[in-house]
Amino acid sequence: MGKGQRATQAFKSTEFIEQARDEDGLVIGGNPFKLAPTNSGSLLQDEGQATSKKATPAPAEESKPQKVPSELEAVPSLILVTTYLSFLMLIVFAHLRDFFGKLFYPANYVQLRVQNGLAPMVSDFESLWTRRLYGRIRDCFNRPITGVAGGHVNLLDRVSTDFNKTFEFTGRVRNVLNLASYNYLGFAQSEGPCADKVEAALLEHGLTMGSTRAEAGRSLLLTETEDMVARFVGSEAALIVSMGYATNALNIPAMVGRGCLIISDELNHSSLVSGARLSGATIRVFKHNYTPDLEKVLRRSISQGQPRTHRPWKKILVVVEGLYSMEGEFCRLPEILELRRRYGFYLFVDEAHSIGALGPRGRGICDHFGVDPREVDVLMGTFTKSFGAAGGYIAGSKALIDYLRLHSHSAVYAEAMSVPVLAQVSSSMRMIMGEDREHALEGQQRLDQLAINTRYFARRLADMGFMTMGHPGSPVIPLLLFSPAKIPAFSRECLKRNIAVVVVSYPATPIITGRVRFCISASHTREDLDYALEQISEIGDLLLLKFHKNQVAAASAAAVAAASDDSKKIQ
Amino acid sequence: MASFSAASPPDLLLAATLEDDDGSQRGLLRTAWDFSFRMVLRYIKNSYKDDPFRTFLEVCLIGFIIWYMTKQKYNIGNNEIELSEKEIDELVDDWKPEPLVPELTDFERETLDKAALLDGPNGTKVRLASGNSKALLNFASYNFLGFIDNPDFEKRAIETLRKYGVGSCGPPGFYGTLDVHMELEKHLAAFVGHSAAILYSQAFTTILSVIPCFSKRGDIIVADEAVNFSLQQAIALSRSKVYWYKHNDMADLERVLQDVNKQLTGRRGKNALPRKFIVTEGLFHNTGDISPLKDLVELKHRYKFRIILDESLSFGVLGKRGAGLTDHFNVDPHEVDLLIGALSYAIGASGGFCCADKDLVEHQRLSGLGYCFSASMPGILAVAASDAIRALESNPEGHFASMRENASLLQSLLKRIPGLQVEGALESPLMHIRLTPETLVRMKRSGGAWTKTDIDRVLAELVEEAQKDGVFLTRAMYVDEHERLLPNSSIRLCVSCSHTRKDIEKCAHAIKNAVSRVTSKKR
C-alpha cells in the first residue's frame, strides 16, 4: 500500500493533472507529453486549430443544451416517411413470404406448428422479426474474429450461399480497422506490461478459483483488486463480479425488494431491466435523460405511495446509466443529484461504458462532472470496456458492500472472478491511476489520446454533414441511418473498405432511428481515423446520409462571407 | 456532382413550400383548393339528398368519436388521490426511506470477518492468508477432476493470452465471437452428443437467460422443489406459471403433470396449448441427489412436456465419459430439450453453455439476454475449457475412477461418525454433512429451540476445528431471505480425483475430531 501511495503522490506532483481543461474534459492548449504516441502530435495540432477557429458551429454540437433529445424533430419529414414506408414494406413482404412459404413449403415451418402435442418453442409472430427481417442482414452481426480486438482486428472471412441461413468460412483472415469493440483505452492487447502481469499472475495463482466468492473463492488477489477498484472510483468499498450482465441482474435484487420502487430510465440496458424484474420491486420508467419527468414520477410516487395500499415506499432506487451506449449520451448527473438531495431516493449509476473512458482522470461520469462519487449510493461498472478484461464491480459505502458480500446472488452463488481477468483489471487500473512506476505516464496518455480521438472524429463527422448523436466527448458516436435498407448497406460497405462497424436497429433502438455506432479507441492512430473518415464520407455520399450537408455548407459560406467582410472593413 | 443531385429530394420538397412568395404559384394553389372544395361539397349534397336517417346516424357517430377521444383515460385499479402541490411537498418532506441495506447481524459480521482468504492458487491444497502458513487439504472448491491446479493448462493459457489477450471487448454479436468460442461450442455439442451448443460467460447467468428465452408469460413450468437458486430465479424471471413437485418424487411429478393437463383440457383460443416444461437438476446442488432421468423422459413423452435439465454440476462428473446425466443413464441427449451445463465446476474454467437443437440455439443468439447483452467469455477460459474436455476424452478412466472411489470412500467413512448426517447420492462427489437433530437436541443443555443462526454457528465452529487439523471446508452459503425453500444448513464437501486415499482418510478423521469437539462443548 505504501508503495502505491507514494507512487500516487509522485504522480500528482507532476504538473499535468492540474492542466486546464474545457467542459468536455479535453486538455486545452495541447498535451504536455512529449512521450505521446507518434500520431498524437498532428492530432493535437488539429485540435488546437479547432479551438482557435470556433467560428464554424458544428450542428450536432449545437443540440447539446436542449432538454429533450431533439434529433427526431430535426429529421426531414421525407426521411421519416420513407423509413416508416420501408419498414411497412418489409413487414408486408415478411408476411407475404410466410404466407406463401407455409402454403408451398410447409416442411420449412414445422418448428412453428404444434408437433405431436407440443406447443412450438418459438411462436410464429415472435420469430417473424428474426426470421424475415434480421435474417436478411444476419451477415452484419456475429462476425467471428480471431486474435485481439484491438485498434485493428482479424476477421474470419465468411460467405453465405443461401441468403444468410448458413455461413461458410473461406479460411481467409481479413485485417480490418476496428471501430466496433469497446476497447476505449486500448487495453485489449496480447503483449505489453498488462499482458506480462497477467502471465505472471497465471503462473502464480492458477487460472480459476473453483468456488464462489462467499465460500472458497476469495483470494488475496481478489480482495486487493477490490480495494483498488474502490480507490479508483472513489468510494469506500467495492465488490467484484465475474460477469458484467450479472453485476446488475444479480445485485439489484439484494438491494430492493417488495414494497420498494425502482425508477428507471426508459433506455436502460437489458441487464438493469432483468435485475429490476428479479427484485420484485415496482418498476416505473421516466423519459430518457429528462430530469423534469423524473421529478414528476418521483413526486407522484412519493405522494401516492404504493399502488392500492397507499403505504409509503420502503425505499426508492433511481437507476440510470452514466453513458448510454446506444445514444452516446451522458446522464444528467448533477441534476439528478440535486433531485436526490430533495427527494431522498437512492441512486444507482451504471458506469458500464463510462468508467475509464470519461473524465480527465478516467474515473467515469462523476469525474466528468466533477461530482463527489460518494454522493452516488451505488456505482456499478464493468471491466469489459476500458480495461480490456471482463466482469464488473459494485462500489459504494462499506455498509452496502459488506451486506452485498453475504447477500448478493453473484457473491454467494456465482463463480468468483478468474485469475487472468483479475490481473488484467488490476494492472490496467494501476496504469490508469499512474501507480505503475515503470509506466507512470502511459495511462494518462491513453486517456488524453482517447479524448482527442473522440473529439476529432465526432467533429469531422459533423463537419461532413452527417447527423450524429450524443454528447461531445463520448467515446461512442452514433450516426443516424434511419432507413432499414441503409443499415446493412452501411455495414457491408464498411466491410468492403476494411472497416468493422456496429449497426443497430429496432429493437435495440426506436424503430425510426437505426444507426451505426463508432467506438473510438486510444489505440486508433490519426491515419486510422482519417482513413475511416474518408471512407465513411464516401459511403455517406453513396447512401445519401449527409442530412446536414446544406446547413454545414451554408454555415461555412456564411463564415467565409463574414471573414471577407471583416477583411474588407480592415482594408 | 452526382452526389449533389442525388441528395436533393428533401430539398425539392423544401423548395416547393418555400416558393409561397411567388404570386402566380399562390393563385394556382387557390384555384385548386376551390375546385376540390366544391367537388367535396357537391358529393356530400348528392349523397345525403334523400336520406335524413343516414345524416342523423353519421352525426351521432361523429359525436361519439369526439366524446370517446376527449373523455378521461382510466387505468384499471387506479385509486390515485388528487393532491395539491403543497400537499405533495409536505408528503415528500415527510417521507423517510429505509436504509439502502439493513445492518448486518452479529453472526453475519462474524461470518464476514472469518471468511476464508486464500493466499495463492486454489487447488487440492490451499494456503490461507490468515493464521499459520500450513497448506490445507481442500474439500471446499468444486475441483472434482483436479483441473483447477493442472500445470499443463496454465501453459496453454499463457499461449492463448499471447494470441487473444484477456477481454474480448464486446458482446458476441458485435465482433466478440472468437474462433475459439465457436470451436468450444462445436466441441461441447459433440461431447454431450447434442445438435448444437451456445456459450455464456457465467454459469449462473446461463440458466437465467435460457429459461426466460423460451418459457414466457402464460407458459407452464413444473419444477422440482429442491432446485438450486439460479433455476428458481430463472423461473421467476420467465413469469411463467409454475408448479412444484416433491424433490425427486416421480409419483408426485406425475400427479402434477396430470393436474396441469386436466386444467388445460377444454381450453380454446390463443393460449389453448402453452409451452410446458419440466425443470430439474442433474446433480442437485443443494442435496447431492441425482435425478431419475429415465423416468423423467418417460413422463415427458406421456404428458407432452419438454425437459429443461440443469447439468451444471453433473457435467464432467456423472457418466462413463463424464458427459453428464444423459451419459450416466445412457439416454439419448436429444431427449433433453434444453440441456444447460456449466464450465465453472468440474471443468475448472468459467461460464456455461446450453445444448439444444440448432434452431433453438440460434434463437438464443438474439433472445438469450445473457448472450446478446454481455461481453463474451475471455479466450483464455474458452481454451481452458476445450483442453479440459479433451483431457476427459483422451483419458476418462484416469479421472473418474479415482474421483468416484474417493467419493464412496469418504461417504462410507463419514457415515460411521456418530452424530453426523450425510446427504448425497453414492455416485456423487458432492455431499452435504450436518449434525443429526438428536445430537443438536443433546447439545443444548438449556433445552431451548435451535434457531438457524445457532446451527450455522455450530457448523462454522466445525469448519474452524477441521481447519486446525489441516482440512479446508466451507459451509454451504445461501441468501436466506431469497431462497424459496431454504435448505437445511450444512457443510458442502467436494471430493476431487486428485485427492489420495490418505487425504480422504485425513479428511474423515478431521471431521470426526471436529464433530466430537464441537458436540462436547457446553452451551
Image: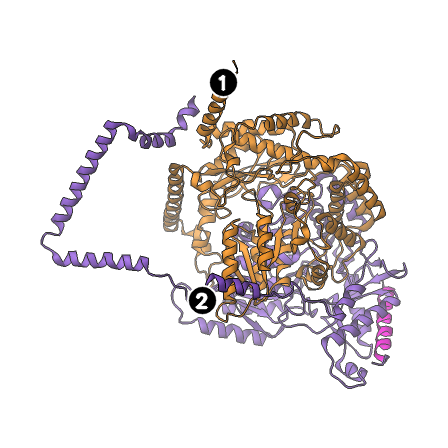
Chain colours: A orange, B purple
Residue visible at 50% across and 74% down in the picture: B258
Q: Which mark is residue A342?
A: none
Front-most of residues B292 and A306: A306
Mark 2 element type: loop
Q: Which residue is mark 1?
A: A564
Q: Where B488 sits versus A208, above or below? A: below
Kindly indicate the quadrant of the structure image that contains residue A214: bottom right
Residue A519 visible in the picture: yes
Element carrying mark 1: helix
Left-right relation of A338 to B65? right
Residue extent of the magenta highlight: B502-519
Q: Tell me the amino acid under the disc marked 1.
A: Ser
Would residue B216 be seen by someone viewing this image from the given angle? no
Please give the count of numbered marks on the rendered protein: 2
For residue A416, above or below residue B442: above
Q: Chain of mark 2?
A: B
Quadrant holding the C terminus of chain B: bottom right
Q: Crowdedness of circle 2 by 10 Å Cα count: few (<14), some, many (20+)?
A: few
In terms of depth relative to the viewer, which is nearer, B417 or A401? A401
> Residue B80 bears which disc, if any?
2
Residue lying furthest top: A571
Q: Amino acid at mark 2?
A: Glu
Q: Is residue B360 left or right of residue A450?
A: left
Q: Few, some or many C-alpha atoms within 10 Å of disc 1 (few <14, some 14-19, many ≥20)?
A: few
Q: What's the magenta bit mostly, secondary-structure-wise?
A: helix
